[in-house]
Amino acid sequence: MNASMPSGATAGPDGPRPAGEAALYQRLREHLAYLRLPDAAAALPTVLHDARSQQLSALATVERLLAVEVDATEARRLASRTHFACLPAGYTLADFDYTAQPGVDEALIRDLASLRFLDEAANILFIGPPGVGKTMLAIGLARAAIEAGHRVYFTTAEDLAARCTKAAREGRWSHMLRFYAGPRLLVIDEFGYRRLDADANAALFQVISQRYLKGSVIITSHAGIATWADRFADPMMAAAVLDRLLHRGIVAAIEGPSYRMRAHQARAEQLRRAVRP
Ligand code: ADP
Ligand code: MG
């Protein structure tokens, strides 16, 4: 402590502080701790220093202090939503190259990126052969939703069916259903890779049914909608699922070239040129 300080005074961020103010400062720190505002508490010395050196008004100072906590809270929530969503890759919609994929309607994707479909609990079906960017677009929209503050969960049809079947066996079926009903957006990737058995059928049907008109689903599938009935063990159930998905459904059929093949071809071309210049 500064030896020349008057008695009763303590050191503040800008040197000695009168006793009354020191007590006030201490109480403010206690308030911030009690309210669990750790980031505002950590920023307090800096904000008070800035308030003096920049002659900020009381209003501006309080705003600056709380803005620190709001920013930190928002960052924590974003990280937690991102962690919860289990996205399998870090793509954003900005990474999608429209010139490489003429089969994708850029205007439609931009419209979807406004996330209006979430307000309408509308569904999106990306249908097309492997490698055309279905999963990438689903992830891009999922990320946009997470960034806009929505809860999102990404899964594959196979994983969803397996988890529901296991939950049913262990008597946790209703718990599992509640889990899949929770997120504002549920992405079900790779529907129809495998013919579904009766249990998987029931799981998918229940999940889609209970989200119907309440929460959006994005489904990707390499199988054309006309063939879906064959992929369900029960064609009636297939019809019921499709009915719910398509009632407020946006179907984006991607007929363009495979981006994966494009990359393979470019590499093969490079190799050929290296071998035979
Ligand atoms: P699908 O789900 O239709 O099989 P993916 O979305 O998994 O295809 O895309 C295959 C690979 O090609 C991924 O690595 C993806 O990032 C990339 N890709 C596909 N389309 C594009 C595109 N238009 N622009 C950039 N990368 C793309
Ligand atoms: Mg895919």
Image: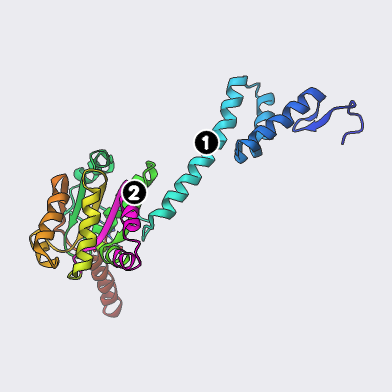
Residue 274 in the image: x percent, y percent? Answer: 30, 76
Write the residue at 16% across / 60% down: 128
Is the residue marked 2 within 8 Å of ligand 2, measured from its CB? no
Residue 90 point in image, percent of width and height: 38, 56
Q: Is residue 100 visible?
A: no
Horizontal side of residue 211 vs 62, given as left or right: left
Query: Ligand 1 is found in which quarter of the picture?
Result: bottom left
Check the picture and name the quadrant holding the C terminus: bottom left
Q: Is 80 or 105 nearer to us in this picture?
A: 80
- Left or right: residue 22 compared with residue 206: right
Q: Amino acid at mark 2?
A: Pro
Which residue, given by chain and number where applicable, does mark 2 sit on? 183
Disc 1: which residue: 70
Residue 103 vs 53, above or below: the answer is: below
110 left or right of 18 in image: left
Q: Is residue 184 visible?
A: yes
The quadrant in which residue 12 appears is: top right
User: Over which residues does the magenta segment extend?
Assistant: 164-193
Which kind of residue does numbered mark 1 sit on? Answer: Val
- Is 189 situated above or below 115? below
